[in-house]
Amino acid sequence: MTTMTATSQDRASQTINYGTVDHAGPVAWSDTAKSEIETIFAKYPDKRSATLPVMWLAVREFGWISHQVELIVADALERPLNEIHQVVTFYTMYPRKPMGRHHIQLCRNISCWLAGAEGLREHIEQVLGIGVGETTADGKFTLSEVECLAYCECAPAMRFDDKYVGNLTRESFSQVIQENA
Amino acid sequence: MLKLVTKNIGIENSHTLDVARARGAYSRVEKAFAMTPDQLIQEVINSNLRGLGGAGFPAGRKWSFLPKDSPKPRYLVINADEGEPGTCKDKYVMIHDPHLLIEGIIIACWAIRAHMAYIYVRGEYDLPIERMEKAIAEAKHVGVLGEKIMGHDFSLDIVVHRGAGAYICGEETALLESLEGKRGWPRLKPPFPAVEGYMRCPTVVNNVETLAYVPYVVEMGAAAFAALGSERNGGLRMYSISGRVNRPGVYELPMGTPLRQMIYDVAGGISGGRQLKAVIPGGSSAPILRADEIDVAMDFDSLAKIGSMLGSAGVVVLDETVSIPEALLVLIRFYAHESCGQCTPCREGTAWLEQIVRRILDSKGRPGDLDNMLRVAKNIIGNTICPLGDAAALPVISYVTKFRGEFEDWLTRARPVGAFPLRATHIGEPAAA
């Protein structure tokens, strides 16, 4: 990873920023992350195949994928920036702006819709005082509406951070919020 | 009722190696190794095991397509990017019986002589990913996976690869692109993945559930496995039943189980004692069935015969209070969102269809909108690289054709303009008249 040192604010200002939210200061991999990247590379026949896992690592390290993060990912993978940007914007799970401490992902597809997800969403928006795609003023919760989570048997469902919560009601939602407030 | 891939659900610590082994895990590997790869492939062909991700392609035949003389490495890629709306089955195998999946992978890799397998799991599936990784580590630790499996001259490594949120990556060539670190844009076929798949090397892509049945094909023998299902549809399968039924859930049943029995016996009938209006029989991409069309055997061939499809076997039940045009908006919004943008007919067509349904439901529909929808849908079919376009267009045609009256009601009836009307009827409340 010899090219990984080529990351600076200078470089960020010289390349096109496609519209992500910037990090405030310089961004660099931690030593742990650097060794994890090597572990990831060992799993694949080429470095490009490691794009998605390295991007996940970047989300864990930096919270969201900013222009600066795209640059150091591109350097680590030895790929052009536009390829990295294509990937970041194609998939829905890489955040491109700062997220709340907790991420509420409410399913809106057919089985959850049949179980009242639409009314539930309106209720949640009221309770949190935000709309879909927004974060509460205290930075605690970000609300997203997502397509099928494959939890149809327990509709309506949400993914709260990394956990699935099924058979969601107004009451059980409030309980989750209280436990994580 | 016989259970195979779901038999360990509910057993304490079924995901751990000790419990799984005590209940039969890895006991079929020796039997598979005793067969030549060609014998094993023939056995799976004879079992009538179909591709349970949705396409229904005979699993053994897919394996047989790998070129015999290629010097390139061969790969098995496991499609665990479960995301067809109404389908929620594969996670049960990964959460409760990860060692069964690993066993199926070992046997499949022996058959296709692959030494590397990637499990592509949808990004949201944290628990399945955790369980699979733990199980792989356990299996390697005791030598049922890794170098020289169980003392045989056969090595195999398995890597869990996490997706990042894209329905299209469930399509096998999009999945391979994604695995290579790119956007999930489907590839033109041919070349098929069997010839040029991951890294342009011979690759088999199989669904989780398909591979989970492979150890049972080996254990029972092809004939006994085939006999569990219906003609040309071997064995059992996991049916995800959701929507307006009393007992939604994932049920493992014989291939060819009648749909009526699934809805009224297995899933306990329509919730609230209401009447059935329609059923989506095989995930959201399947053309819808009216209530008078449910006397059908739930296998690939029987549903194809009546113009629908078994697909991923996600059964979604709509009762009499559900508005079909509103249900269609939920689905077409989904396809417009998930279209990868590569092919014009799909990218533009799904967006236009969503707009038309929205304006109909906003009481701004125009005369001719319904025929226009049919025309747009028909211009998508067959004109795209991958089946997502068809998967969006076929339901549109079936909803508009079979429930045309409901759409016409929206076109003729005066509705208050303003609030967006998409609102599921809450269970227990009558539909807005």
Image: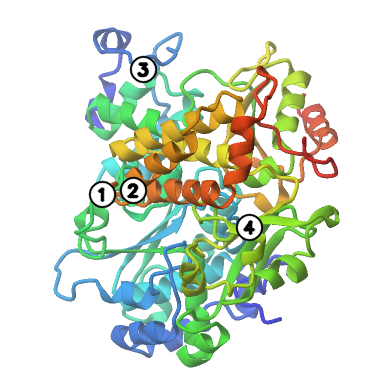
Query: Residue flagged by tag 1: what amino acid is it?
Result: Arg
Q: Chain of mark 4?
A: B
Q: Which mark is residue B174?
A: 2
Marks 2,1: beta carbons within 8 A: yes
Q: Which residue is mark 4?
A: B279
Which percent across, then down, holds residue B298? Answer: 57, 71
Query: Residue flagged by tag 2: what amino acid is it?
Result: Ala
Q: Which residue is mark 3?
A: A68
- Within-10-Å neighbours for mark 3: few <14, some 14–19, many 20+: many
- At x 73%, y 25%, the residue is A122
Q: Are marks 4 and 1 on the same chain?
A: yes
User: Real-space Cα distance between discs 2 and 3?
Assistant: 28 Å
Q: Name the residue nearer the viewer: A6 or A127.
A: A127
Query: Residue flagged by tag 3: what amino acid is it?
Result: Gln
Q: Secondary structure at mark 1?
A: loop
Give the image's coloring scheme.
Answer: rainbow
Residue B238, located in which quarter of the rendered image? Answer: bottom right
User: Real-space Cα distance between discs 2 and 4?
Assistant: 29 Å
Q: Chain of mark 2?
A: B
Q: Name the residue nearer the viewer: B109 or B316.
A: B316
Q: Chain of mark 1?
A: B
